[in-house]
Amino acid sequence: MSLNARMSLVSESADCRVIRVYPDGVKTRFSPGQYGSLGLPSEADPAKLIKRAYSVSSPLLDESGALVDANELPYYEFFFNRVAAPEGGKERLTPKLFALKDGARIFCGTRFSGHYTVEKAPRGRNLLLVATTTGEAPHNAILAAFLAQGRGEKVCSVLAAPPGWESPYDAAHRRIQEDFALYKRLDIRGPDYSALEALISHCIQEESHSLQALGFALRPSGCQVFLCGDPAMIGAPEKLGAWNYESRRGGLFNMLTGAGFEAGTRFKEGNLEHESYW
């Protein structure tokens, strides 16, 4: 496989990096929330590509402050955390992506996959997006598409991260919150997810607190929840094989299903969607 795209560096910090990938050929359409693949040659065998899947993010706004349609842009935007290169182990793609210079050549897959998409947010339900660090990548694409539909439902985006971690999308979220009365952004910082869990628990138990904190009541009948990022934050059952699952302790999944939310799958509609990173 040849390198079929060009990389442009948007921003980076000690923690994360945002890049845009411009394909040489026609850009493939995707559903907001889906993931695609990136790749670079292996150091051990340059004829072989090291590939990995990443959710497609969105810049959210154009230079004029208007919501963007990610499918109308000439590039795909990707957002990932900095990770250390393994010593003497298997090659990993993310450290290689951090070493790329602006304008470098890269492989970009032409197929996009995943069922964690804006189509899982039906009309008539408010939307709660909860992410950890780069788990907000698909949420950015979902958020821009959801708000652009002008449906009238409210949206709250919650980002949980370690102390000192900053999202490169903070300014865009602040602008959207100013321009869209139906949108609310919450940032939670801490060494673990106890503050996030306390917030969601309080919102479930007291509707008045939910209305104040999220902008809407956190109840199964009127809300669609998306959880993306660290499996420890999500706490969804781990698949062991076939139809066997092992329940995990803690996490928002158990809290929400205990409150009546039902997990959706590719075969069944629900009001709780989740996608784990790591």
Image (cartoon, helix red, strand yellow):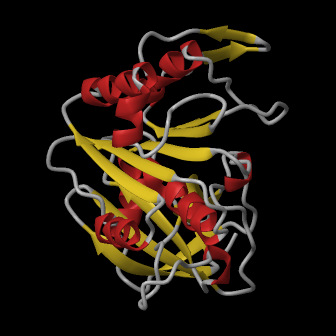
The number of discs equals 0
Nearer the observer, 250 or 175: 175
Relative horizontal placement of residue 177, taking residue 188 as reference (left or right): right
- Residue 239, relative to residue 140: is it above or below? above
Residue 126 spot, x, y in % from top left: 58, 46
Q: Quadrant of the N terminus?
A: bottom right
- Residue 202, relative to residue 226: is it above or below? above
Nearer the observer, 270 or 231: 270
Q: Looking at the image, which residue is at 62% across and 55% down?
A: 33
Q: Quadrant of the C terminus?
A: top left
Nearer the observer, 236 or 203: 203
Q: Looking at the image, which residue is at 43% across and 43% down?
A: 131
- Residue 166, relative to residue 110: is it above or below? above
Relative horizontal placement of residue 260, taking residue 78 as reference (left or right): right
Q: Is residue 192 visible?
A: yes
Q: Residue furthest front?
A: 208
Residue 93 spot, x, y in % from top left: 46, 55
Q: Residue furthest right?
A: 267
Residue 49 spot, x, y in % from top left: 59, 60
Q: Looking at the image, which residue is at 56% across and 40% down?
A: 226
Relative horizontal placement of residue 39, taking residue 265 as reference (left or right): left
Nearer the observer, 277 or 102: 277
- Residue 217, relative to residue 39: is it above or below? above
Q: Quadrant of residue 273?
A: top right
Q: Looking at the image, which residue is at 38% across and 45% down?
A: 158
Q: Is residue 84 visible?
A: no
Q: Residue furthest bottom?
A: 64
Q: Quadrant of residue 35?
A: bottom right
Residue 69 spot, x, y in % from top left: 62, 77
Q: Quadrant of residue 149?
A: bottom right
